[in-house]
Image (tube, rainbow, N blue to C red):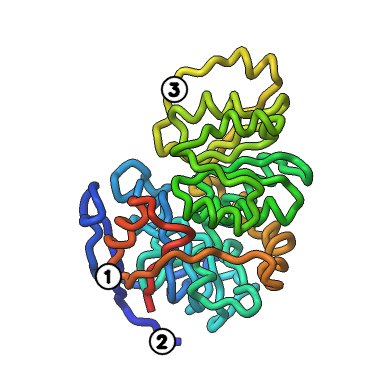
Protein backbone atom coordinates (compact mmCIF):
# COMPACT_ATOMS: atom_id res chain seq x y z
CA UNK A 1 0.00 0.00 0.00
CA UNK A 2 1.45 3.34 -1.07
CA UNK A 3 1.04 5.89 1.69
CA UNK A 4 0.57 9.63 1.17
CA UNK A 5 3.08 11.99 2.74
CA UNK A 6 0.46 14.19 4.43
CA UNK A 7 -2.99 13.79 5.97
CA UNK A 8 -5.93 15.86 7.15
CA UNK A 9 -6.24 16.24 10.91
CA UNK A 10 -8.05 18.32 13.50
CA UNK A 11 -5.63 20.03 15.85
CA UNK A 12 -6.07 22.06 19.01
CA UNK A 13 -4.94 25.51 17.92
CA UNK A 14 -4.92 26.82 21.50
CA UNK A 15 -6.59 25.85 24.78
CA UNK A 16 -10.27 26.75 24.78
CA UNK A 17 -13.76 25.85 23.66
CA UNK A 18 -14.83 23.68 20.74
CA UNK A 19 -14.01 26.41 18.21
CA UNK A 20 -10.26 25.98 18.81
CA UNK A 21 -10.38 22.69 16.89
CA UNK A 22 -8.98 23.54 13.46
CA UNK A 23 -8.46 21.53 10.28
CA UNK A 24 -4.78 21.17 9.43
CA UNK A 25 -2.39 19.08 7.38
CA UNK A 26 0.18 16.90 9.09
CA UNK A 27 2.81 14.38 7.98
CA UNK A 28 1.54 10.78 8.00
CA UNK A 29 3.10 9.10 11.07
CA UNK A 30 5.24 6.00 10.66
CA UNK A 31 4.82 2.88 12.82
CA UNK A 32 7.71 2.05 15.10
CA UNK A 33 8.62 -1.38 16.47
CA UNK A 34 5.54 -3.10 17.84
CA UNK A 35 3.17 -0.53 16.35
CA UNK A 36 0.57 -0.45 13.60
CA UNK A 37 -0.42 2.42 11.33
CA UNK A 38 -4.19 2.61 10.89
CA UNK A 39 -5.99 4.41 8.06
CA UNK A 40 -8.81 5.84 10.15
CA UNK A 41 -12.40 5.40 9.02
CA UNK A 42 -14.18 6.58 12.18
CA UNK A 43 -12.95 8.16 15.42
CA UNK A 44 -14.76 8.12 18.76
CA UNK A 45 -15.37 11.37 20.66
CA UNK A 46 -14.80 11.21 24.41
CA UNK A 47 -14.71 13.50 27.45
CA UNK A 48 -10.90 13.34 27.72
CA UNK A 49 -10.73 14.88 24.22
CA UNK A 50 -12.61 17.91 25.52
CA UNK A 51 -10.39 18.11 28.60
CA UNK A 52 -7.30 18.03 26.38
CA UNK A 53 -8.82 20.71 24.13
CA UNK A 54 -9.44 22.90 27.20
CA UNK A 55 -5.80 22.52 28.27
CA UNK A 56 -6.38 20.41 31.37
CA UNK A 57 -5.34 16.94 30.13
CA UNK A 58 -1.90 16.81 28.55
CA UNK A 59 -0.96 13.89 26.30
CA UNK A 60 1.58 11.47 27.80
CA UNK A 61 5.19 11.73 26.68
CA UNK A 62 5.67 10.59 23.11
CA UNK A 63 1.96 10.67 22.22
CA UNK A 64 0.47 12.73 19.42
CA UNK A 65 -0.76 16.19 20.38
CA UNK A 66 -3.86 15.58 18.25
CA UNK A 67 -7.02 14.56 20.17
CA UNK A 68 -8.68 11.18 19.74
CA UNK A 69 -8.29 8.10 21.96
CA UNK A 70 -10.09 5.47 19.85
CA UNK A 71 -10.67 4.73 16.20
CA UNK A 72 -11.58 2.07 13.69
CA UNK A 73 -10.11 1.55 10.26
CA UNK A 74 -7.76 -0.54 8.17
CA UNK A 75 -4.17 -1.44 8.99
CA UNK A 76 -2.03 0.47 6.48
CA UNK A 77 1.43 -0.62 7.68
CA UNK A 78 3.04 -2.55 10.53
CA UNK A 79 6.23 -1.88 12.44
CA UNK A 80 9.06 -4.28 13.15
CA UNK A 81 8.09 -7.31 15.19
CA UNK A 82 4.34 -7.10 14.55
CA UNK A 83 2.96 -10.50 13.59
CA UNK A 84 -0.69 -10.42 14.72
CA UNK A 85 -1.78 -7.84 12.13
CA UNK A 86 -1.14 -7.31 8.42
CA UNK A 87 -1.93 -4.54 5.95
CA UNK A 88 -5.60 -4.65 5.02
CA UNK A 89 -6.87 -5.97 8.37
CA UNK A 90 -9.90 -4.15 9.74
CA UNK A 91 -9.43 -3.20 13.40
CA UNK A 92 -10.57 -0.93 16.16
CA UNK A 93 -7.94 0.33 18.56
CA UNK A 94 -7.22 2.20 21.75
CA UNK A 95 -4.95 5.15 20.96
CA UNK A 96 -2.51 7.25 22.99
CA UNK A 97 -3.82 10.20 20.96
CA UNK A 98 -4.09 11.25 17.33
CA UNK A 99 -7.44 9.74 16.38
CA UNK A 100 -8.81 12.94 14.81
CA UNK A 101 -6.77 12.32 11.68
CA UNK A 102 -6.67 10.20 8.53
CA UNK A 103 -3.81 8.06 9.89
CA UNK A 104 -2.74 7.15 13.41
CA UNK A 105 -0.18 4.86 15.06
CA UNK A 106 -0.77 2.76 18.16
CA UNK A 107 0.75 -0.32 19.80
CA UNK A 108 -0.32 -3.43 17.90
CA UNK A 109 -1.38 -5.04 21.18
CA UNK A 110 -3.99 -2.29 21.69
CA UNK A 111 -5.87 -3.16 18.50
CA UNK A 112 -8.77 -5.60 18.40
CA UNK A 113 -10.59 -7.28 15.55
CA UNK A 114 -14.01 -6.03 14.52
CA UNK A 115 -16.79 -8.05 16.17
CA UNK A 116 -18.66 -10.26 13.74
CA UNK A 117 -21.18 -8.33 11.68
CA UNK A 118 -20.20 -4.96 13.17
CA UNK A 119 -19.50 -2.00 10.90
CA UNK A 120 -16.49 0.27 11.31
CA UNK A 121 -18.77 3.10 12.50
CA UNK A 122 -19.96 1.14 15.54
CA UNK A 123 -16.56 -0.45 16.18
CA UNK A 124 -14.98 2.99 16.64
CA UNK A 125 -17.08 3.30 19.81
CA UNK A 126 -15.67 0.23 21.51
CA UNK A 127 -12.05 0.71 22.65
CA UNK A 128 -12.00 3.70 25.04
CA UNK A 129 -15.33 2.81 26.60
CA UNK A 130 -14.91 -0.94 26.92
CA UNK A 131 -11.29 -0.70 28.15
CA UNK A 132 -12.43 1.80 30.79
CA UNK A 133 -15.48 -0.14 31.96
CA UNK A 134 -13.84 -3.55 32.01
CA UNK A 135 -10.74 -2.39 33.89
CA UNK A 136 -12.64 -0.29 36.45
CA UNK A 137 -15.88 -2.19 37.04
CA UNK A 138 -14.65 -5.77 36.79
CA UNK A 139 -10.88 -5.75 37.35
CA UNK A 140 -10.50 -2.90 39.84
CA UNK A 141 -14.04 -2.86 41.23
CA UNK A 142 -14.46 -6.63 41.34
CA UNK A 143 -18.16 -6.64 40.47
CA UNK A 144 -19.79 -10.03 41.06
CA UNK A 145 -23.11 -11.60 40.14
CA UNK A 146 -25.90 -10.64 42.54
CA UNK A 147 -24.23 -7.43 43.72
CA UNK A 148 -25.96 -4.05 43.57
CA UNK A 149 -24.15 -1.80 41.08
CA UNK A 150 -24.77 1.93 40.66
CA UNK A 151 -23.41 3.78 37.62
CA UNK A 152 -23.70 7.54 37.35
CA UNK A 153 -24.16 9.06 33.92
CA UNK A 154 -26.01 5.97 32.79
CA UNK A 155 -26.84 7.36 29.34
CA UNK A 156 -23.22 8.23 28.48
CA UNK A 157 -20.97 5.99 26.43
CA UNK A 158 -19.41 4.68 29.64
CA UNK A 159 -22.80 4.31 31.32
CA UNK A 160 -24.54 2.44 28.50
CA UNK A 161 -21.60 0.04 28.30
CA UNK A 162 -21.43 -0.48 32.06
CA UNK A 163 -25.17 -1.18 32.30
CA UNK A 164 -25.06 -3.85 29.60
CA UNK A 165 -21.95 -5.61 30.89
CA UNK A 166 -22.98 -5.53 34.55
CA UNK A 167 -26.43 -6.86 33.71
CA UNK A 168 -25.00 -9.64 31.53
CA UNK A 169 -22.66 -10.77 34.30
CA UNK A 170 -25.50 -11.00 36.81
CA UNK A 171 -25.40 -7.77 38.80
CA UNK A 172 -28.43 -5.75 39.85
CA UNK A 173 -27.97 -2.48 37.99
CA UNK A 174 -29.01 1.02 39.09
CA UNK A 175 -28.23 4.09 37.00
CA UNK A 176 -28.62 7.85 37.30
CA UNK A 177 -29.50 10.11 34.38
CA UNK A 178 -30.87 13.61 33.89
CA UNK A 179 -34.12 13.17 31.98
CA UNK A 180 -37.03 10.78 31.56
CA UNK A 181 -35.79 9.95 28.06
CA UNK A 182 -32.34 9.05 29.35
CA UNK A 183 -33.80 7.00 32.19
CA UNK A 184 -35.90 5.07 29.68
CA UNK A 185 -32.74 4.34 27.67
CA UNK A 186 -30.98 3.05 30.80
CA UNK A 187 -33.91 0.79 31.66
CA UNK A 188 -34.05 -0.54 28.11
CA UNK A 189 -30.38 -1.54 28.35
CA UNK A 190 -30.90 -3.46 31.59
CA UNK A 191 -31.00 -1.07 34.54
CA UNK A 192 -33.37 -2.41 37.20
CA UNK A 193 -33.92 1.15 38.41
CA UNK A 194 -33.12 4.32 36.45
CA UNK A 195 -32.95 7.33 38.76
CA UNK A 196 -33.62 10.84 37.46
CA UNK A 197 -31.14 12.79 39.57
CA UNK A 198 -33.03 16.04 38.96
CA UNK A 199 -35.97 14.97 41.10
CA UNK A 200 -34.88 11.79 42.92
CA UNK A 201 -32.21 11.09 45.55
CA UNK A 202 -30.03 8.16 44.58
CA UNK A 203 -28.75 7.91 48.16
CA UNK A 204 -32.19 7.19 49.59
CA UNK A 205 -33.12 4.82 46.78
CA UNK A 206 -29.94 2.75 47.22
CA UNK A 207 -30.29 2.73 51.01
CA UNK A 208 -33.76 1.21 50.69
CA UNK A 209 -32.21 -1.52 48.53
CA UNK A 210 -29.46 -2.22 51.08
CA UNK A 211 -26.81 0.05 49.63
CA UNK A 212 -24.63 -0.26 46.54
CA UNK A 213 -21.88 -2.85 46.60
CA UNK A 214 -20.10 -0.96 43.81
CA UNK A 215 -20.46 2.57 42.43
CA UNK A 216 -18.85 3.80 39.21
CA UNK A 217 -18.68 7.59 39.24
CA UNK A 218 -17.42 10.24 36.85
CA UNK A 219 -19.13 13.21 38.51
CA UNK A 220 -17.11 13.80 41.68
CA UNK A 221 -17.68 17.03 43.58
CA UNK A 222 -20.69 16.85 45.90
CA UNK A 223 -21.38 13.31 44.68
CA UNK A 224 -18.37 12.00 46.63
CA UNK A 225 -19.87 12.18 50.15
CA UNK A 226 -23.25 11.12 48.77
CA UNK A 227 -21.67 8.08 47.13
CA UNK A 228 -20.13 7.08 50.45
CA UNK A 229 -23.57 7.30 52.08
CA UNK A 230 -25.09 5.22 49.27
CA UNK A 231 -22.60 2.37 49.65
CA UNK A 232 -23.37 -0.81 51.54
CA UNK A 233 -20.95 -1.91 54.24
CA UNK A 234 -17.79 -3.27 52.56
CA UNK A 235 -18.82 -1.38 49.38
CA UNK A 236 -16.45 -0.01 46.76
CA UNK A 237 -16.41 3.34 45.00
CA UNK A 238 -14.47 3.56 41.72
CA UNK A 239 -13.81 7.09 40.47
CA UNK A 240 -12.96 7.63 36.79
CA UNK A 241 -13.52 11.39 36.29
CA UNK A 242 -14.49 14.60 38.11
CA UNK A 243 -17.01 16.57 36.07
CA UNK A 244 -17.86 18.54 39.23
CA UNK A 245 -14.28 18.74 40.48
CA UNK A 246 -11.95 16.52 42.55
CA UNK A 247 -11.96 18.38 45.88
CA UNK A 248 -14.57 18.02 48.60
CA UNK A 249 -14.85 17.65 52.38
CA UNK A 250 -15.27 13.99 53.28
CA UNK A 251 -15.58 12.26 56.65
CA UNK A 252 -13.21 9.30 56.46
CA UNK A 253 -14.35 7.82 59.77
CA UNK A 254 -17.26 6.11 58.04
CA UNK A 255 -14.84 4.56 55.55
CA UNK A 256 -13.09 2.84 58.45
CA UNK A 257 -16.22 1.96 60.40
CA UNK A 258 -18.00 0.49 57.36
CA UNK A 259 -14.89 -0.97 55.70
CA UNK A 260 -15.37 0.95 52.46
CA UNK A 261 -12.91 1.08 49.57
CA UNK A 262 -12.35 4.18 47.44
CA UNK A 263 -10.24 3.70 44.34
CA UNK A 264 -10.07 4.87 40.76
CA UNK A 265 -7.97 5.13 37.65
CA UNK A 266 -7.42 6.90 34.37
CA UNK A 267 -6.67 4.86 31.29
CA UNK A 268 -4.40 7.03 29.16
CA UNK A 269 -1.35 7.25 31.49
CA UNK A 270 -1.20 3.49 32.09
CA UNK A 271 1.64 1.49 30.57
CA UNK A 272 1.39 -0.14 27.16
CA UNK A 273 1.63 -3.52 28.90
CA UNK A 274 -1.28 -2.75 31.23
CA UNK A 275 -3.46 -1.71 28.28
CA UNK A 276 -2.43 -4.82 26.34
CA UNK A 277 -3.56 -6.98 29.26
CA UNK A 278 -6.94 -5.26 29.27
CA UNK A 279 -7.20 -5.87 25.51
CA UNK A 280 -6.46 -9.56 26.06
CA UNK A 281 -9.17 -9.82 28.70
CA UNK A 282 -11.69 -8.07 26.47
CA UNK A 283 -10.94 -10.39 23.56
CA UNK A 284 -11.73 -13.40 25.75
CA UNK A 285 -14.52 -12.12 28.01
CA UNK A 286 -16.38 -9.46 26.00
CA UNK A 287 -15.76 -9.79 22.26
CA UNK A 288 -17.76 -13.04 22.04
CA UNK A 289 -20.72 -11.13 23.52
CA UNK A 290 -20.34 -8.48 20.82
CA UNK A 291 -20.04 -11.22 18.17
CA UNK A 292 -23.34 -12.68 19.34
CA UNK A 293 -25.09 -9.31 19.56
CA UNK A 294 -25.76 -9.82 23.27
CA UNK A 295 -24.37 -6.33 23.91
CA UNK A 296 -23.75 -3.50 21.46
CA UNK A 297 -22.47 0.07 21.48
CA UNK A 298 -25.22 2.66 21.72
CA UNK A 299 -24.92 5.30 19.02
CA UNK A 300 -25.97 8.94 19.44
CA UNK A 301 -24.73 10.92 16.45
CA UNK A 302 -22.03 11.30 13.82
CA UNK A 303 -20.19 14.29 12.39
CA UNK A 304 -17.63 14.72 9.59
CA UNK A 305 -14.05 15.15 10.80
CA UNK A 306 -14.17 18.84 9.84
CA UNK A 307 -17.11 19.33 12.23
CA UNK A 308 -15.30 18.06 15.31
CA UNK A 309 -16.20 21.31 17.07
CA UNK A 310 -19.90 20.53 16.62
CA UNK A 311 -19.32 17.02 17.97
CA UNK A 312 -17.67 18.49 21.08
CA UNK A 313 -20.53 20.93 21.51
CA UNK A 314 -22.97 18.03 21.35
CA UNK A 315 -21.00 16.06 23.93
CA UNK A 316 -20.60 18.97 26.34
CA UNK A 317 -24.32 19.80 26.14
CA UNK A 318 -24.92 16.41 27.82
CA UNK A 319 -27.92 15.91 25.56
CA UNK A 320 -26.51 12.78 23.97
CA UNK A 321 -27.41 9.17 24.71
CA UNK A 322 -24.53 6.85 23.85
CA UNK A 323 -21.53 7.54 21.66
CA UNK A 324 -20.62 10.33 19.26
CA UNK A 325 -18.30 9.57 16.32
CA UNK A 326 -16.39 11.44 13.62
CA UNK A 327 -16.42 10.15 10.05
CA UNK A 328 -12.88 10.44 8.78
CA UNK A 329 -12.91 8.42 5.55
Mark 3 and mark 1 in contact? Answer it, CB < 8 Å. no
Residue furthest toward the bottom?
1
- Rounded to the nearest angstrom, the CA distance separating label 2 from label 1 is 25 Å
> Mark number for residue 306?
1
Mark 3, residues whose alpha carbon is within 10 Å: few (<14), some, or many (≥20)?
Answer: few
Mark 1, residues whose alpha carbon is within 10 Å: few (<14), some, or many (≥20)?
Answer: some
Q: Is residue 23 visible?
A: yes
User: Which residue is found at the position 49% from the left and 71% from the top?
Assistant: 72
Which circle's residue, 3 or 2, is located before the other in the chain? 2
Where residue 32 sits in the image (x, y, percent)?
Answer: 49, 66
**Is 284 positioned to the left or the right of 319 in the image?**
right
Which circle's residue, 3 or 1, is located before the other in the chain? 3
- Rounded to the nearest angstrom, the CA distance separating label 3 from label 2 is 54 Å
| Residue behind mark 2 | 2
Which circle's residue, 2 or 1, is located before the other in the chain? 2
**Is 204 positioned to the left or the right of 325 in the image?**
right
Q: Nearer the viewer, mark 3 or mark 2?
A: 3
Whether residue 216 is situated above or below residue 114 in the rendered picture: above
Whether residue 264 is situated above or below residue 104 in the rendered picture: above
- Mark 1 lies on a secondary structure that is helix
> 140 and 310: which one is in front?
310
- Rounded to the nearest angstrom, the CA distance separating label 3 from label 1 is 39 Å
Where residue 174 sits in the image (x, y, percent)?
Answer: 62, 43
User: Which residue is found at the position 61% from the left and 51% from the top?
Assistant: 162
User: Which residue is found at the position 40% from the left and 32% from the top?
Assistant: 245
Q: Is residue 136 visible?
A: no
| Residue behind mark 3 | 248
Q: Quadrant of the N terminus?
A: bottom left
- Mark 2 lies on a secondary structure that is loop
Amino acid sequence: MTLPETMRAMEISEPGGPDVLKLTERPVPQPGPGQVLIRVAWAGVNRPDALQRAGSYKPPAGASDLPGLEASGVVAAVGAGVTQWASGDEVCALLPGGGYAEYVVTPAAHALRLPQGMALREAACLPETFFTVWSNVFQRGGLKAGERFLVHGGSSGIGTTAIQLARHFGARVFATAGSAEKCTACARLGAERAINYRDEDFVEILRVEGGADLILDMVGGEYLPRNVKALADDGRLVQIAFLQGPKVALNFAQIMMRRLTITGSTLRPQSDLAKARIADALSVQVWPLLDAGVIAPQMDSEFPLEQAAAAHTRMESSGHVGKIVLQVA
